[in-house]
Image: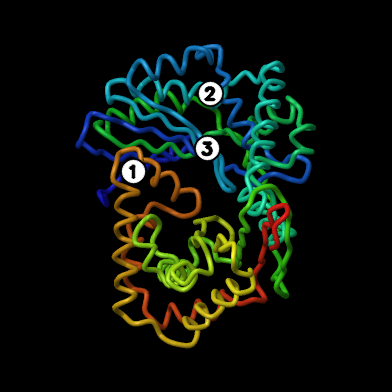
Amino acid sequence: MTKSITQVTLKNGLLVMLKEIHTAPIISSWIWYRVGSRDEPTGKTGISHWTEHMQFKGTKKFPANMLDKVISRLGGHWNASTSHDSTRYYETMPADKIDLALRLEADRMTNSIFDAKDVASERTVIISEREGSENDPMFRLGEAVQNYAFRVHPYHHEVIGDMADLRAISRDDLYTHYRTYYTPNNAVLAIAGDFETKSMLERVRSLFERIPKGITPPRLARPEPEQKGELRFSIDGSGETTFIQIAYHFPNATDPDYFPLQVLDSLLNGASGLSYKTSRLYRALVDKGYAVDVSGYSDASIDPSLYRITITKHPERKVEQAISILDSEIMKLQEKLVSKDEINRALKQARAVFAYGSENITHQAFWMGYTAMFSTYDWFITYLNKLARVTPQDVQRVAQKYLQPASRVIGFYNPKGKGG
């Protein structure tokens, strides 16, 4: 997992990251672009996600109607996604078929068509996706929390964008966005799997180095001012379940406090997918009948983001009871040092989650590009060591610093006809 990688920057600025893994005859190739919803001004929200969709409409060399069939027939799979900080595309193929993926990505870095009819049809698809999401209570609550937590920074809006912008963005807007950000000097190519580094690098050079370097893309510089007090709001919607989401402002992934906060999250909510029922909040809220479920998560982001705790309220309890218990558990962390044994249990869970999330070749290639968006690959290979250095004093300090009511947003989702 920590085997060294080869990193080369081509003449046009493309960062190439290669990692040989000879456990299976498979190669996974990821192309990452440094553009996401944080790069979108008001009036253009959702344009990065929409541009991602347009990349699947094909080029003259690779028509859209052939790609799915060919990749599936060759035993591969491919997909893409957009986040606040980046857009990424991947293909995982049998090792002797990876050249198709490399040729495809080199071609659509510059030659995607953006046909007006495709833009119109995709507008309908994305608006429908947005409308479907609005039927999900957790989407509505999460979006509202984001809106309240960020007044200035472009993390304010969801990746899919605001409906008004989705109706107004034009074909020319999309194509300009594509030409501005889809350049080799704004991209990272991460490849992991069963190949020989020298020959792979030669092939990458032959396909990508001919692509001209682009201008340095513009970046929005709108840091979020410090929040001066707790914000609370409620929204009404369909369903029968009341949800509560509490969001604390949280440092970015390269801040030294990021790591003790990960340990703190494991103590409160348990490592993702592992032993969460032994976590402090689960025992205090769910086991004692104040909530049906509780979970927490945070992003590894370029700029300071949010740490969110979501509580599914028990139908026979009041929301203030759940919040009071949450505050009590946080206060315990702020006032009393956690035992070293409890931290060690949290670290053991974190190691297991980390191992599961980086065990296969596709995941290995993912982590190479993902960490390049906000740091370097060293962030990945030193992650567990940094967690292991976290002390009880570190956990207490970050709990006192970040988990304060004055810097949080609390949102309530009230089902129609039910009390919140």
For residue 87, above or below residue 240: above
Residue under numbered circle 3: 81
Closer to the camera in the image, 32 or 246: 246
Marking on residue 226: none
Closer to the camera in the image, 231 or 238: 238
Residue under numbered circle 2: 108
Q: Residue type at mark 1?
A: Gln
Q: Is residue 260 visible?
A: no
Residue at position x 44%, y 65% in the image: 269
Secondary structure at badge 1 equals: helix
Colour scheme of this structure image?
A: rainbow
Residue at position x 38%, y 61% in the image: 271
Residue 193 horizontal side relative to residue 145, left or right: left
Say which label, 1 or 2, has the lower sequence index: 2
Is there a contact, CB below 8 Å, between mark 1 and mark 2? Answer: no
Closer mark to the observer between disc 2 and disc 3: 3
Residue 244 on image: x %, y %: 62, 62
Closer mark to the observer between disc 3 and disc 1: 3
Residue 365 on image: x %, y %: 36, 40
Closer to the camera in the image, 292 or 5: 292
Residue under numbered circle 1: 364
Secondary structure at badge 3 equals: strand
Residue at position x 63%, y 58% in the image: 242
In the current view of this chain or complex, which residue is farthest to the bottom? Answer: 335
Residue 382 on image: x %, y %: 33, 61
In the current view of this chain or complex, which residue is farthest to the front? Answer: 316
Q: Residue type at mark 2?
A: Arg
